[in-house]
Amino acid sequence: MAAEEDDGRPAALLLPTLVRAAEEDDDDTDKLGDESATMRPRPPVGDRTCRFLGVLFANRRIIRSFSFAINLFLHLLRRLPWTIPSPSAPIHRVSLLSPSPQPHLSYSIDLRPDLGADSYTKASEPGADSSSFFVLRDDLLHPLANGNKARKLDALLPLLLRLPATDLVTCGGCQSSHAAAVAVYCAKRGIRSHLLLRGERPEVPTGYNLISEMFGSSTVYVARSAYIRRNEMLLEHAHGVAGAGGEVMWIDDIVGEDLGEMNSERGIGEDGSRRVVIVNEGAASSVALLGVIRLVDYLAQANIFGKEQKIRIVLDAGTGTTAVGLALGVVLLGLPWKVTAVMLADTVERYKEREKHLISEFKRIHQIEIPQQTSSGDDDGIVQWVERIHPRRFGKVLDGEIEACRHIARQTGILLDPMYTLAAWERAVSLARDAEDDAKAVMLHTGGTLNMFGLAQRYRSHFSSDD
């Protein structure tokens, strides 16, 4: 019999549900596709044990020790089924060779830098070059669907497979890398993806728009006036996909469901009916945070960055979900790290509001209290939100930025795009120059390199000559 709580909340919350989904029978692992064969082995956990752990998470009166709750959370996190077989990604080190400003700054790159505690000891010795930063190459996770998009889908897709979901509805801009990633990963796992893209269909599809068209089950272009009401738009389209006998739910509403009971009672799929799951733009979801926290857990290993060295993680922020996930991982693991997110698409007030919402949902779902830790001491947030070094309206490319990306690519082999990753690169360069407290700057490459194909159509003059 399933364990229940006195206050009526579900006993099996997200983590125990996913662990049970992965390990209660051998057939479930087959649904994850060929990649599941390469995932690291997990010790068996019985259904009864998972339900008991679910009760512990749901009942705050039982878990009186913060450290116990965190350790239990991390223990379960490391045993979840994942979309990405391994959390690892190549880490390169970029050194600054001249003090002049970009785009004339010269770089060198170390493709196999020393990591771990010994490397930091050497770097702090007199005469050592401290003007450098690391680049976590998440852009190399997948040829088409990589970067933070892949990280945010890491825990989400196995949950959909367990549900099981027949369809997924999401939205994004015309060149949305999130929408393209959803289309690619869903196609590999037999889930139909329905993409609502803002604006008009390009005359010649290219970049992420082309990937969405090729892999998505359906692609609908939505007028900007209608796209403003995203939730209403997504819900209406999802009900249209589900039909009269189908079911529609938001991804975060799945959390806490007893999936086995749900399937036995409702029998979705047996009669051809459809179960449609809605994922917000950019996968801005509490479920998506888990994949990013998994990345922090990996980076904190002794042979990577360890738990003692001061680290400053820098990334560009669209919805801000990845930045919040990174900062949550830092807090949960008790690391002396800071997360600096370069704001691209909104005001600092909106980013802070979104941060509070994601953290609130995370605490509600997992019943874990987050320590009162701030990023800069002047607010109550765990992320340091900063403006671009060269501010502009979102989507605008400034003169010289295409050439700056070309210059960086030729000297380092790292492809950036001026709308997103160039902003994080510029901030990482600034931190490397002004290193304080021996903190090491680590830029998270959030992918999105196919954006350059779309930009080449919009800004043809920037690509027509090689200055």
Image (spheres, grey):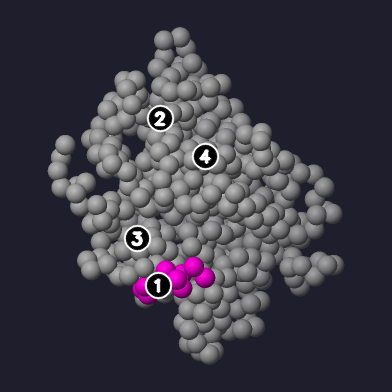
Q: Which residue is mark 3?
A: 175
Q: Is residue 455 visible?
A: yes
Instruction: Name which residue type carries label 1.
Output: Ala
Q: Which residue is mark 2?
A: 429
Report, in whole angstroms, how far the alpha carbon at label 4 lies from the one at label 2.
Answer: 15 Å
Was residue 401 drawn as part of the magenta stretch in this picture? no
Q: Tell me which numbered mark, 3 or 2, is placed earlier along the sequence.
A: 3
Q: Is residue 191 above or below residue 329?
A: below
What secondary structure is found at the residue carrying circle 4? strand
Residue shown at 58% from the left, 84% from the top: 267
Closer to the camera in the image, 98 or 276: 98
Horizontal placement of 95 versus 167: left or right?
Answer: left
Q: Are marks 3 and 4 in contact (CB under 8 Å)?
A: no
Rendered image: mark on residue 184:
none
Task: Give the quadrant of the N terminus.
Answer: bottom right
Q: Is residue 133 visible?
A: no
Q: Nearer the viewer, mark 4 or mark 2?
A: 4
Q: Are marks 3 and 2 in contact (CB under 8 Å)?
A: no
Q: Which residues are magenta?
A: 219-229
Q: Nearer the viewer, mark 3 or mark 1?
A: 1
Instruction: Name which residue type carries label 2.
Output: Val
Closer to the camera in the image, 207 or 135: 207
Q: Which residue is mark 4?
A: 386
Q: Are marks 1 and 4 in contact (CB under 8 Å)?
A: no
Q: Tell me which numbered mark, 3 or 1, is placed earlier along the sequence.
A: 3
Residue shown at 48% from the left, 84% from the top: 240
Report, in whole angstroms, how far the alpha carbon at label 2 lies from the one at label 1.
Answer: 39 Å
Instruction: Name which residue type carries label 3.
Output: Gln
